[in-house]
Image (cartoon, rainbow, N blue to C red):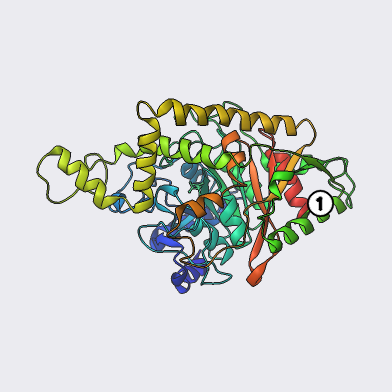
Amino acid sequence: TKHLLARVTAHEALGAFLHTDPEASLAAATAADSRRAAGETGALIGVPLAHKDIFVTRDMPTTAGSKILADYRSPFNATVIQRLIDAGTVSLGKLNCDEFAMGSANENSAFKPVNNPWDAGRVPGGSSGGSATAVAARLVPASTGTDTGGSIRQPASFTGITGIKPTYGVCSRYGMIAFASSLDQAGPMARSAEDCALLLSAMSGFDERDATSVQRPPQDFHAQMLQAREGASAAQPLKGLRIGLPREFFPEGLAGDVNAAVRAGLQELEKLGATLVDVSLPRTQLAIPVYYIIAPAEASSNLSRFDGVKFGHRAAQYDDLLDMYKKTRAEGFGDEVKRRIMVGTYVLSEGYYDAYYLQAQKLRRMIADDFQQCFTQCDLIAGPVAPTVAWKHGEGKDDPVKAYLADIFTLPGSLAGLPGMSVPVGFGDGGMPVGLQLLGNYFKEGQLLHAAHALQ
Ligand code: GLN
C-alpha cells in the first residue's frame, strides 16, 4: 500500500485519481495485516485497489465526475464497495471518470482529463478511464469500473488491460450512481482474467436493495474458470469451444491495425483448440440509435434528482424555486450531460414516445433475440472492442456523434444484458494496445474467463 501510494503521487499527471486519503489507506492495510495474522486466508485480504468515482463511499467524497456532486458525501457504501471491503481489500482512493459515466474518452470529466499511460497524448477510453489508467500504469493491481454501453471493455482495450462486464443483474447497482438503470453493470478491471475472476466473486451476488439483482447463490467465478478447463489437454484447453465471429463485427470501416491484432488473437484461440464459426448479428448498426435513445431516456429520468435540494451543489443566487433548479443544473452539469438530458426528455415526451422510445425498446428485444440465434451455433462470440486504437486528446471532442459511432461493437451486448470482456491481444498504430472482445450467453462468465485465461 505504501509503495503504491508513492506511485500514485509520482504519477499524478496521469489524472487517474480524483481523491486519495493515504492515512485511511494505511490504516486499512494495517487492519488487513491483522486479519492475516489472525489466520484469515482470503485471496483479497490486503490487496490495494481503487474505485471508479461513480460508486458511493462513506469515507471519501463521491462526485461521479460532476461538479454538481463536488462536495457530496454519501452516508453509506455501495454494495460492491462494501463487499470488497469485507473481502479485505484496501482502497487507495476514487478514480476519475466521465461525468455520470457518459463518454468514451474520459474527456467529459468535470475535473480533469486522464492520460493513456502508453502515450500521454492519447485518451485512455471511457467512461472508466481513470480505472483503466490506474491499472495500466501499475498504480493499483486492479480497480472497479462500470459498463453501461462499453465503459469497462473499451478503456480496458485502449490501455491493454483485462476487464469484465458481467451479465446484467450479477453485481448490485445499489450505491452505483445511476446513468441508465436497465444497462448499468459494475465489474472489475485488472491485469489478468484470473484477477478479474477473484474480484468478481467478491463484488457480485444477490442484493435485496437492488430490484434487478439476480437471485442466486454466491458464485465462485475463479472455480468456474478453472472447471471449464477440466478434461481438456494442457495444449488445447479450448478444445470443443465454438467461437462465433459475427460478420458485422468486421466491417469495411474497421481499422487495419485493429483487424490484424484481433485476427492474431483469433488464431491464437484456434491454436488453443477453439473452432471459429461465422455468425451474424444483423442489427449491429441499429444498436447505436437504439442505445442513444434508451440510455439518454433513462438518464433524463435518473438525473432529475440533482435539483440543488437533496445533493451536492446549489446555485448561490436565485429568484424562486424554479430559478434555483435551473441555475443549479445549468452550473452543475457539463455539456454532454445536458445534451443527453435534452435528448432523453425529447424521446420520452408525448407524441415522440411511440416514435422513438417504444421503437427502440422493440429493437432492443430483437437485438437480444439475434444473440440467442447466434448462441445456437456457438458458445462465445468474438470480435474487436472498438473500431480503432485510443485516439489523441481533443480528437472527437467536438463531435459527439463520431464518439457514439465508435461504440458500435460494445453496445449490442449491453442492450442484450450479456456478459462481455476485453482481453489484450496485441498492438496497433502508434504502439497502442488492442483488445479482443469476448461475449458469452447469460451467466456464462466462467466460460468467458476460461477462454480469456487460456489466451493469457
Ligand atoms: N460510451 C458510451 C456512452 O457514452 C458508454 C458509456 C458507459 O458504458 N458508461 O454512453
In the image, is 198 to the left or to the right of 393?
right
**Residue at the bottom extreme of this rendering:** 10
Residue sitting nearer the eye, 408 or 19: 408
Q: Position of residue 151 (x, y in %)?
A: 53, 49
Q: Is residue 143 above or below residue 239?
A: below
Q: Which residue is mark 1?
A: 269
Q: Quadrant of residue 9?
A: bottom left
Residue at screen point 79% across, 36% down: 378
Amino acid identity at mark 1: Leu
- Quadrant hosting residue 167: top right
Report whether 48 appears left or right of 366.
Answer: left
The C terminus lies in quadrant: bottom right
Q: Position of residue 128 (x, y in %)?
A: 50, 53
- Which residue is more in the foreground, 282 or 278? 282
Q: Secondary structure at mark 1?
A: helix
Does 244 sit left or right of 125 as displayed?
right
Picture layout, residue 24 above or below residue 371: below
Q: Residue at x 62, y 57 (%)?
A: 157
**Residue 126 point in image, percent of width and height:** 50, 55
For the question of whether residue 211 can be seen, the reply is: no
Image position of 127 with respect to 1: above or below: above
Within-10-Å neighbours for mark 1: few <14, some 14–19, many 20+: many
Question: From this viewpoint, is residue 258 visible?
Answer: yes
Which quadrant of the view contains residue 230? top right
Q: Position of residue 3 (x, y in %)?
A: 52, 69
Q: Which residue is drawn at the image coordinates 12% and 50% (left, top)?
A: 317
Disc 1 Cβ-to-ligand 1 distance below 8 Å? no
In the picture as drawn, the residue positioned furthest to the left comes out as 319
